[in-house]
Amino acid sequence: MAIETEKKYRLDKPAMVAMTDKLRELGARFVSERFEQNFMYRNGIPDETNAVLRIRKIGESTFLTYKERIKNDSEFKTKIEHETLVSDAEEMEFIVAKLGYKLVVVYEKHRKTFHLGECEVVLDELPFGQYMEIEGEPDEILKVEKMLGAEAFQSESRGYSRLTAKFGKEEGGVKTARFERAHTA
């Protein structure tokens, strides 16, 4: 079982560029840049954990993830996360549906990943905005936040599924946030 702790910030385009420059200036190690498609499924049974299944496609790779929110009163978002590589995305989608899960949200994002200190810092561009996430232990997140000057940014407690539900569009009963096809090429 993996516990994921992160803090998310909403950025405008100039701040996104500034954070990229600041990460390089601080000697952050660039890890990757990728395009992701995320498909979120719920089973329709309300519970306190807000548990979801996610199928994420990155290039030719597909991952199945179980995410469960851990309630806390801190400024950090903490989740239990289990993830595995899947060899056949279409078969996994079929299995998830047969288990009673319903596709509720689809969103795409461009992600740049860096390592700074003991944290992973990601810069995400979604069709409805730009975000930065700092993931690590809470004290390390605060150190990196200070190094980047990120205290000045608006923190965002909602996950991308909820943001898509708010800012995305309805397509056949599913909330979506997709880029124009020319943008993903």
Image: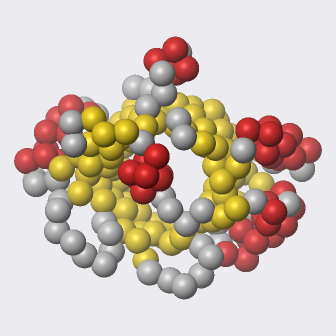
Above or below: residue 69 compared with residue 62: below
Q: Position of residue 173 (x, y in %)?
A: 22, 43
Q: Position of residue 39 (x, y in %)?
A: 33, 43
Residue 138 picture quarter: bottom right
Is residue 93 in sight in this rendering? yes
Q: Nearer the viewer, residue 134 or 74?
A: 74
Q: Nearer the viewer, residue 94 or 18?
A: 18
Left or right of 63? Residue 24 is right
Q: Residue at x 85, y 60 (%)?
A: 149
Q: Position of residue 146 (x, y in %)?
A: 84, 66
Residue 44 picture quarter: bottom left
Is residue 135 in sight in this rendering? no
Across the whole image, how many numbered discs are drawn on residues? 0
Please identify the residue farthest to the left as the structure is shown: 98
Left or right of 158? Residue 151 is right
Q: Residue at x 45, y 26 (%)?
A: 59
Task: Name the quadrant of the N terminus.
Answer: bottom left
Above or below: residue 65 compared with residue 181: below
Above or below: residue 89 compared with residue 77: above
